[in-house]
Every structure is written in C-alpha cells, then in structure tokens.
Image (cartoon, rainbow, N blue to C red):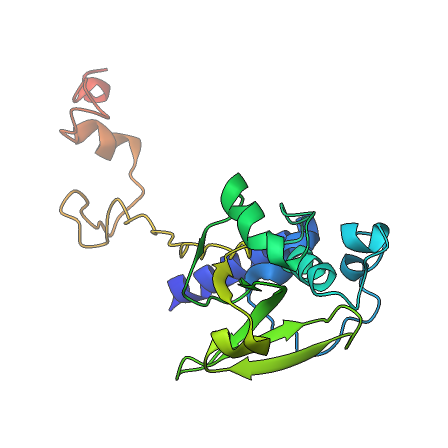
Amino acid sequence: MTKIVKNSMISLLFTLIIFSVFPATVYAQSYEPRLTAPSGEPYYTRECNTYAQTGYGMPNCVAYVYGRIYELNGEAPKISRGNAGEWWFINKRNHYYEYGSQPKLGAVACWSNHVAVVEKISGNGAVTISESHWGGRYFDTKTYADMSSHYGQAFYGYIYAYNKPEEEPEIVIDEPEPSYTAMDNHFELQKKTCFSVLEFAKSDNKIMNPNNNILLNQ
C-alpha cells in the first residue's frame, strides 16, 4: 500500500512539473476533437497562420488545416504552401510526413481539390472531419462512411501530420530490502546491556576485549 501511495505521489509531482515547465506541449497529450469553429486562436489568424498572412485566410480549407495542425502539434506544419489539390503531392515529394489510406486522428484527409482534418473515427469505420471552404462556410464538420464521396472528388488518402505523443513508461520505484531483520541469526537479543568494568574484563569477547582478564591481573 505504501508503494502505491508513493508511486501516485511521484506521478502527480512529475505531471505538475511538466505543466509548469512545458505548457505549450501538454495540451497535446490526449486528442481533443475540434467540433466547433475557431474563435480567434492565433493558429488560424495572421498571428501564426501563413495562409492568413498572405491574404488566403479562412474561410479556406488549407488555411484551416494549416491552423489545426499547428494547434495540435504546437509547432508550424511542414507544409506551408500550395493549394488543396497540391498538399498530397507536396508532402510525398518532400517526405514531410508519413501517409496512407487508413484514417487516424489528426490526419489530413486529401482530395483532388480539398483538405480536412480527421477528428473522430467510429467503431464502424465512419470518419468525422472538420473543414473550412474557400468562398463558402467558415467551418463545419461532416461524417463519412466513404471518403471518396466527398463532393465527387478523387480521394488521395491521409497525411499523418499529427505528432501523437508517445505514452510515458510507468515509473516503478523498488524499495530496497532491509539488510537485516529482527530474526536475523547475526544478532542475539540480550536482556542486559550495561556491564561493570569487572564483568567486561572477565568476558571472552575477542573483538571488544582482546586483552582478556587484563584488568584482573592489575
């Protein structure tokens, strides 16, 4: 029980240290889907968003996806140029992120002229995306069982741009075993702990009284 309490206290202490020293990265420890529109966060504005800075801010699918990945990772995305139809090929050509056909949380879904971000994956394989639309809706979410049906465009696949944090190993602290116990054979319990000079002189303890009986001979 003592070990469990001690381990819990240490884990709590490490968590507090991480929150105080690395506040910019802690929020990414568990995936929080975005199901509502951005409301002034710097990732989506001219403050941090490359597309917004060049006059192509939201509503715009690439501006939104750029901001969303920035928000998830806490750092600017490696893809910082190109329109929606170019992101898939820019990533492949430059080897920025891994990519594939399986949906993952935080992945960028790419079509021939649109990009979005995977926010949820249901047990039956349906994918919920968040997105923005050039010259249209500022933000919305949709759930698809078949991603290729999105606006009739060709579906390329997913860019795995979200840096999912690795799970921290469990901290286990082994308590050292005691070097002796009360029942250890190296120790003999004695009732009497105080001896007179004469009693000690008579003892045959070769360590503490190597000159046995010396006092008796004086």
Side of 79 relative to 161 (left or right): right
Could you say which quadrant of the image residue 60 lies in? bottom right
Residue 61: percent from left, percent from top: 70, 65
Instruction: Name the residue at 69% across, 57% down.
Output: 66
- Residue 95 appears anywhere in the view: no
Q: Quadrant of residue 118?
A: bottom right
Residue 35 position, x and y percent, is: 66, 78
Decide if residue 200 is in sight here: yes
Residue closest to the eye, 126 or 148: 148
- Tally of numbered discs: 0
Residue at the spot x=82%, y=56% of the render? 52
**In percent of the image, x 18 and y 19: which residue is there?**
210
Residue 65 quadrant: bottom right
Q: Seen in the image, is 21 located left or right of residue 148? A: right
Residue occupying image coordinates x 56% and y 68%: 31
142 left or right of 149?
right
Q: Position of residue 124 (x, y in %)?
A: 39, 84
Q: In the image shown, does 91 or 86 lie closer to the viewer?
A: 86
Which quarter of the rendered picture does the N terminus lie within?
Answer: bottom left
Q: Quadrant of the C terminus?
A: top left
Q: For this rendering, which residue is in front, 156 or 170?
A: 156
Percent position of residue 34, x then y: 65, 73
Name the foreground residue: 96 vs 72: 96
* Outermost top residue: 218
